[in-house]
Structure formats: C-alpha cells, structure tokens
Image (tube, rainbow, N blue to C red):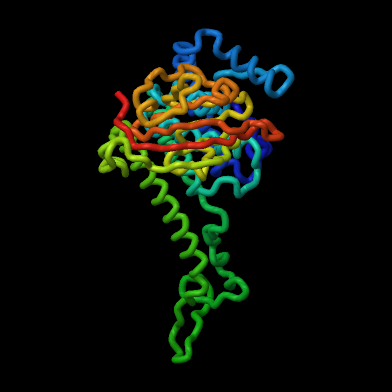
Amino acid sequence: MSYYDPLINMGGRMAAGDRELIGRGLELLAAGLGPFVDRQMTATRGRNWLAGFEQRDSAAFGGIRSNNLTDVRFLLRVITEERQIFHNALPRPGVSLASQLREVGNTYGHDFSPTAFSPADTAGHLIAMARLLQLAGASTQAGAVRQLLTTTRQPPGAAPHPAPTSLAGGTPPPGRAAHSGDPGAAPARGEAGRPSKPGLSARRPVLFGILVVGGVTLTLLILAMISFVVGEAGPGPTPTPTQNKYRHVKNGTRLGAYRGIKLSGEHFLDLTDPKHPQESEGDLYFNGVRGDLKADRLAVLDAGDAGSYQACRDNTDYARNPVTPRQVQGRAFCVTRDDGVLGLLTITSDHEPTGKRLTLDLTVWKGPQPQ
C-alpha cells in the first residue's frame, strides 16, 4: 500500500524521521494483515464479505463506498468492529492492539505536523505493529517492522557536529579563546600566566548533543531487542479466572447494579466499570453507525423473562451476529465474560435525538467460567 505524504514527497524536513517510519510500518502492517483478515472474514461471512461492507457503508454514509485489502485503516477497522470474529482468531491482546493502531493510522492520515509523532511514540507504535503482525501469523512483516526500530535519526534541537575551529594559519573565530589546538595561534594565558583550558560552556552544546543522540539511540535499540524477544516468544498466556480480581468471589455474588447507563456509539461498555465507557476495549460494543450491539457472548432472553443470575448463567444460546437495539427493546439480554463475570442488561431508551446513544440498566454477578 502506498501513502501520499507531503512531508516526504516534497522533500520536507521529516523525510528521514518518525513520520516516515510510521508510514513504512503501516505499509508492512497492511501487507501482513490483508491476507489474514480476508481469510477470517471469508470463513465466517463468505466470499462476498467485502461487498457487504461496502453496501453497509454506502447506506450509512451515502454515495458509493469502496474498500480494499491494502488499506491498513480499513483492515484495522474490520478487526475492531468484527471483534466477535477476531477475538477467537487473534490471541490477546490482538484486538486491543488493533484499536490502538487504528488511532495511529488516523493520526498519520490527518495530522501532518512535525510534532504528530515523537521518537518515543514512534518506537511504541512500531512495537505494537510488530506484535500484532506476529499474533496474526505474519512473521516476515513483523521482522521487517522490528528492523525499523533500529533506524535512528538525530532528534530535533540536537547540536550539529562542530565545525573545524579555524583555517590553517588563521585566527580563532570571534568570541572563542585561542588554545593549543589552533594552529598558528598563541595560547591564551590564564590568571597565573598558564595556558587556560577551553571553558565548559564552550563544550556544553557538543556534549549535550552527544548525550541526546546517544540516549535516543540506546533507547530504540533496547526497545528493538525487547520487541524481538517478545515476537520470537509469541503471545503470552491468556489470563484465567484464577488470575483475575474476582478469583476469590463466590459464584452468584452480585457485584453491582446500575441504572441509567449512557452508552454512546462507537464505545464499549465494561461490565465492572459501566460508568466509564471506553473507545478501545470492553465487554459490549455499540456501533452507532450500523446501530447494533456486539459481545463475545450475548444471549437474548425470552420475551417476558425479566432475567436473573440463573437465567444468564444457564443461557448459552449466544447470538452469532450483532443484534439491534430494536430486537432487544423491552427484553433482557445477558453478556458473559471470559472470567465468568456476567451482566443482565435491559435497554430503557434509544430515542436520543441523534439516534446514537442508548440508556441501559445493568446488574452484574460473578459466575463460572464459560466452557
């Protein structure tokens, strides 16, 4: 995939800097994720899944929409919006990394300022790209991204290498005392009549530049080594219920009850922190554009069933596709997490003026780990 970057194509100052490294990383990310995303979506949605996405986008945004498998921002969007599919296809924390890198792609596509990516930001984003590629099985592209971590540049503001002190036989530059290293110049005399050494202030810019460049180089090399080790070792183990904060809580214990929770579009609801919906990760996702709800394990209860801990614990008829608020309006539904935490939810209102916010009631219990 190619990106048009004015700062690079017009010979800007950032041509060898952080922005170019991010662009190269995104290109490698697209090359590695394209076949992976296509395989997973074809297996679950059929060969025409891409056309289905385009039809939904055209209906939601108007006009003719075209998506392709070389667009890294589209690929990351698919992973995050179809997390019910990729939760199983990508080991943790794959979907979270995709959410993080989706923001990176948006910044790259819209923010052309020199401060958009700092050296530290760049190193962190490249590590995330390499990790996601490794989790997706794209080892070749993951290795290429790790190689980018060894590419360093002189940070802005660092002092340039010092110019020669003087021409042979000439005099020292104005404002600088002559010393024994300047040919043809008499040594400066100190108070005691002895040659004086160059002042610390004269050497400070050079020393500062060396320290800054050395520090940045060392940091990036260390990060590259860490990324390489993590990538070679593969993803870490998935936490089990005995490792989470509720491991000592008895099954059936109520963890909380909440009324009037506001959930805006493109936000996730965390069952154990429902008052603070997040944009990157959670247990229930509300897609405001398409107007549907997704969760790894979402079971809609029968009409007239107000719901209970036992009802949510025993109902494993999880929806295979996203559900719309209209489908569950007036009905209770359950969301179950990997660690056994389960929530009973009811939608009390979806009549916000924008049509992109829900109001829900929620009761949360600690339950057994789903099999």
Q: Quadrant of residue 39?
A: top left
Q: Position of residue 198 (x, y in %)?
A: 48, 76
The quarter of the picture where residue 107 lies is top right
* Residue sitting farthest toward the top: 47
Q: Which image quarter holds the C terminus?
A: top left
In this rendering, does residue 353 appear at all? yes
Q: Residue at x 49, y 80 (%)?
A: 187
What quarter of the picture does the N terminus occupy? Answer: top right
Identified at 37% across, 37% down, the residue is 365
Tell which of 42 and 114 is nearer to you.
42
The answer to whether residue 232 shows anywhere in this view is no
Query: In the current view of this chain or complex, which residue is farthest to the bottom?
Result: 192
90 with respect to 4 (left or right): left
Residue 358 in percent (x, y) is at 60, 34
Q: Along the line of sight, which residue is nearer the eye, 357 or 211?
A: 357
Total label count?
Answer: 0
Left or right: 358, with 191 as reference point? right
Residue drawn where x is 65% and y is 20% of the image: 57
198 vs 291: above or below: below
- Residue name at image x 55 percent, y 9 percent: 48
Q: Residue 134 location in percent, x, y?
A: 38, 29
195 and 335: which is toward the camera: 335
Residue 327 quadrant: top right
Q: Is residue 38 above or below residue 149?
A: above
Residue located farthest toward the right when viewing the structure as drawn: 63
Q: For this view, does 131 lie left or right of residue 20?
A: left
Q: Is 240 displayed left or right of 45 in the figure? A: left
Q: Position of residue 94 (x, y in %)?
A: 42, 31
